[in-house]
Image: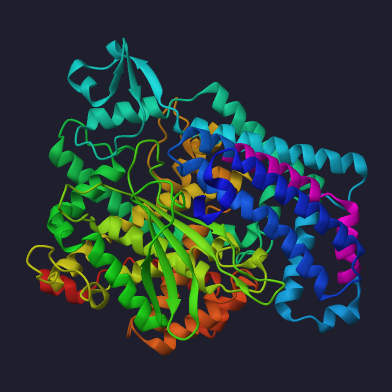
Amino acid sequence: GLFGVPELSCPEGFQEAQDRALQESEQLVQKACSTPPGPETVMIFDQLSDSLCRVADLADFVKVAHPDTAFREAAEEACRNIGTVVEKLNTDVELCQSLRRLLADETVMSSLDPETRRVAELFMFDFEISGIHLDEEKRKRAVDLNIRILDLCNEFLIGTHIPNKIDKHVLPEHIRYNFTAEGNYLQVAGLHADCPDDLVREAAYKIFLHSNAQQLARLEELLASRNSLAQLVGYDTFAHRALQGTMAKNPETVRQFLEKLSEQLSKRTQKDFQMMAKMKMKLNPHNSMLMPWDHPYYSGVLRAERYNIDPGLYCPFFSLGACMEGLNSLFSQLLGISLYAEQTKRGEIWSEDVRKLAVVHETEGLLGYIYCDFFQRPDKPHQDCHFTVRGGRLKENGEYQLPVVVLMLSLPNSARGAPTLLSPGMMENLFHEMGHAMHSMLGRTRYQHVTGTRCPTDFAEVPSILMEYFANDYRVVNQFARHYKTGQPLPKNMVSRLCESKKVCAAADMQLQVFYAVLDQIYHGKHPLKKSTTEILKETQERVYGLPYVPNTAWQLRFSHLVGYGAKYYSYLMSRAVASMVWKQCFAQNPFDRAMGERYRREMLAHGGGKEPMLMVQGMLQKSPSVEDFVDALVSDLDHDFETFIMDS
């Protein structure tokens, strides 16, 4: 069966696994309600969470990645059913009472260790944000709103990817071949951001982002429902609810962070836009005004022209085997951890190119498993991501339940006999996702509710972004980057050029991220919104980003992160700031420093979500960073490295 779960040798097995989980959860609910307050209460709640998550997490992965439609549909159904049960349990008064009794008992509470206390509080928080303290009628409304929000999220997400169609005669004949033809129509399925033809990018932008009444209605209902739910359970706005327990703590801090960052970036961004406009004028003298569809393309042209970083020059040095060796060597030096390929049993994997790795510590032994689903295949989503399939926890019998994760990339399938070669971007993504996997393996908490990456969103990206700093350091790259034919190492100046090229137009790229984050905060801020979502987009784009809004477009309807990162899109920037500070202070001197690796494990990875994120950051940096420190860290990363500049000059 999939992942070694016997029932999952066929799609119908999801029903069986789900029934078993629901049966188990009913028994655990009864047990929780009849157990006197004590550490056992938290243990039972965690078992309850585990029995549901073991099915839901696995199904979450299968519903997007399994090549067989029947498996995908069965998993989708299981997700929905378990989701509904979770919403009901979160409003189960009797279940909540058993936890309340524990939290109210000061003697017992003071005898609990910090992790158990935090987990008890996190479970309570789940009850409270579901409206447990409300009367029955309002509680029912909270459950209904939660279920409606789940449906709207799914519908909105599907809508973000649906191509737009246009009558082919509307477009000039010489650019039609760029789009898929369907009878008299052309399908536009994306922004064609890398296309050298300005007209193709402009057409794709205006057509793909053309407003759609149905999707607009979904977004408006989603934002309004989230706001109603937040207010129903006692928060001012959805953002206040979403930011509880994060590093930022509240929308005010996020606002300050984004405003100060924007202020610090503005001169550099203007300079970047001027460079892009100059380049556009050089290549297209008739039309030099910089538009939103130009930014990704011309920043790429500038990068390539200034640093000659054709990915084709780099790929031969980054075979998949070499990159995996590099990760193995880095983890072994920093953390005493090795990755071993393991044979899979029949039916355990969903595609024959999936590889299973055992993660083994030199003294602690087996820590868990990583399934590597690295290659493109039809119907597989094109995003790189990390899935927790099973969380780690200490079981009742004293054994540790080993974590299981999947890393999903979309690498090209290699030609027969040749190794898979990665572009520098793919190599960096591999390191990024491996950062999440190590967090999952080393966040060995007693409770699966806070295991590994089950921590606040603005902290969850720190370990993965930190790995990008390792991937961009010559000392690290030099350990593994070898030409697959000649064995020659990647020259140092090629790595330096690559790193410096990433700083070209980086201020404008970061400003774009700030714009998305500000937009997300406004959408999830005070309701009713003062204007329509499109008018807010126009105003925010011109104020924060600086490139003109294009009439009749509605970029927000393609903003899929509003689903999973509602009110938390800023997390990428804040996590990057923390990762940058950790890198500079702890690893820039020596990226293989074992003592620092151990400190990093002890202070940041080991707690999963079982400790307040800011306390983990403080433990690592040995000081408490301010919003200004975060902004300075991000901005100082944009400065060019003088040594490389001299070498290249």
Magenta segment = 75-103
Residue 135 is left or right of residue 624, and the answer is right
Residue at 55% over, 64% down: 453
* Residue at 23% over, 55% down: 423
Query: Is 514 on the left-hand or right-hand side of 452?
Result: left
The correct choice, above or below, for 386 with respect to 118 in the image is above
Colour convention:
rainbow
Residue plotted at (71% across, 54% down): 241
- Nearest the viewer among 146 and 44 is 44
Q: Is residue 10 magenta?
A: no
Q: Where does residue 152 sit, x and y in percent of width and height? A: 63, 34
Q: Can I make out residue 528 in this image? A: no
Instruction: Judge whether residue 101 is colored magenta.
Output: yes
* Left or right: 528 as drawn, with respect to 424: right
> Is 601 above or below relative to 505?
below
Could you say where residue 348 lies in the image, as x and y percent from the top left? 46, 52
Q: Give the quadrant of residue 378.
A: top left
Q: Quadrant of the C terminus?
A: bottom left
Number of numbered markers: 0
Horizontal relation, residue 148 to residue 99: left or right = left
Expressed as whole percent of the image width and height from the top left, the position of residue 639 reads 30, 69
Q: Which of the 4 quarters of the picture holds residue 113? A: bottom right
Residue drawn 18% across and 54% down?
A: 311
Compared to 15, does 200 lie above or below?
Answer: above
Q: Nearer the viewer, residue 364 or 270?
A: 364
Q: In this view of the protein, can residue 280 be seen by the observer?
A: yes
The x and y percentages for residue 517 are 51, 51
Residue farthest to the left, as pictured: 486
Magenta stretch secondary structure, dominant: helix
Q: Nearer the viewer, residue 628 or 57?
A: 57
